[in-house]
Image (cartoon, rainbow, N blue to C red):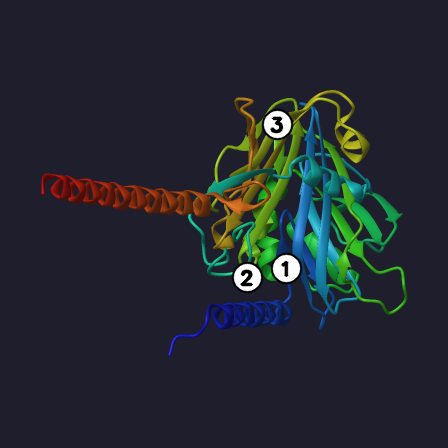
Amino acid sequence: MRGTPRTSQATRILTTIVALLALQLGSLVAPAYACGCGAMIPSKAERIGVDREESAVHWDGRTETIVMRFNVHGNARHAAWIMPVPSRAGVTLGDPALFDEIERLTEPERRDRFYFWPRADDWPFGGGYGDGAGAPPPGAGSGVGVVGRERLGPFDVARLTATDPKALGDWLRANGFELPERLTGALQPYVDRKWEYVAVRLAPQEKDAVLQGELTPLRITFASSELVYPMRLSRLAANDQTLGLSILADHRMEPRSAIGGDRPEVTFAGRIERPEGAVAGLAGQGPVHLTVLEQEFPNPARIDDDHHLRTVADTPYREVEYHDRLLTVAGGIPVWLLTTGGGLLLAIFAAILVVRAGNRRRAATGAGVRSAV
């Protein structure tokens, strides 16, 4: 026996919930050593996972600013996070309103799309007339230089230089964190290029609290002659990775290559004539182009470089969300009903005329016969 549409829909919803719960439990089993453009490392015997990482980048041709916000889960009371940068970095707290404002600026255009014949949820099959379905002090290991250290809200930030990736491991171990052996090797390309590092210790301000939910954004600024977004450390991730990147620059910007992931998808590109609020706080008050990218990394181990972005044609793009609606007139009367009903009435009227004409002919013929008699 086939189930009803309502039963099938309930089954699909239950299956989806079970799958999401299984995914959530699975993410708590193993620590998340890598995320987006850095490495996040919990204390021993603790677990932390990154549900979502959002990044907004501004580049004016000389200086790059990255604002990052993490949404995390797990039982970790402390965690360390490392981000390589090509030059000396300044670190401050970011504006939490920035990502909400970018989401508002880039929301899809909504359009109605009409259909003629009724669907399952429309009358007479379903409802009535209407719409259709629609960091602590660094360790004193050799090879590590401490540029600066600041306490920023829930973050203890150390800005470091290193001539040996093992020195960063010594720094972490001196502060209670175990550096995965794979991360030491992944840092080697940055050491070879003489990059520096922002090392952050995350700790809730409330005693005995764990790192949960949306963390305060961090704003990292450094000099750079090109727009680069560090991604190489994400190759250590055990699970699929998703990159969401909003870029504010003089022109539309896109990655030079996929660096081992799926092809980057542009979900918005457009010129913001007069930035306001947190967007103006990041990009200034003059006109700026905003490009929003989404990219999937089904096999993070294939990530082989950082994202190097280039200027492309300033072609605007905005996603369109269609809302399917049943075509109606006069306060919600379906056009199909008027059309088919009108056609039926015409057919009935025509049939009546044919019958009447036949009756008149028969009457006329009968009268003629009687006259002849």
**C-alpha distance separating marks 2 and 1:** 8 Å
Please determine whether, in this image, residue 155 is positioned above or below residue 360. Answer: below
Label 1: which residue?
Answer: 33
Dividing the image into 4 quarters, which one contains the C terminus? top left
Dividing the image into 4 quarters, which one contains the N terminus? bottom left
Question: Could you say which is closer to the camera, residue 349 or residue 327?
Answer: 349
Residue type of the residue flagged with mark 1: Tyr
Instruction: Please state the horizontal and vertical placement of residue 346, each as a whole percent of the image.
Output: 36, 42
Residue type of the residue flagged with mark 3: Gly
SS class, disc 2: loop
Note whether residue 264 is visible: no
Going from N to C along the chain, the mark reached first, 2 or 3, is: 2
Category of crowding for the residue at label 2, using alpha-carbon neighbours closer than 10 angstroms: few (below 14), some (14–19), many (at least 20)? some
Going from N to C along the chain, the mark reached first, 2 or 1, is: 1
Category of crowding for the residue at label 3, using alpha-carbon neighbours closer than 10 angstroms: few (below 14), some (14–19), many (at least 20)? some
For image coordinates 66% across by 48% down, the residue present is 164
Residue type of the residue flagged with mark 2: Ala
Q: Is residue 178 left or right of residue 30?
A: right
Instruction: Please state the horizontal and vertical placement of residue 6, each as a whole percent of the image.
Output: 51, 69
| Image depth: mark 3 or mark 1 in front | 3
Q: Residue furthest front?
A: 373
For image coordinates 48% across by 54% down, the residue present is 298
**C-alpha distance separating marks 2 and 3:** 35 Å
The reply to whether dot 2 and dot 1 touch (C-beta < 8 Å) is yes
Q: Which mark is residue 238?
A: 2
| Image depth: mark 2 or mark 3 in front | 3
Going from N to C along the chain, the mark reached first, 3 or 1, is: 1
Please determine whether, in this image, residue 236 is positioned above or below residue 336. Answer: below
Label 3: which residue?
Answer: 270
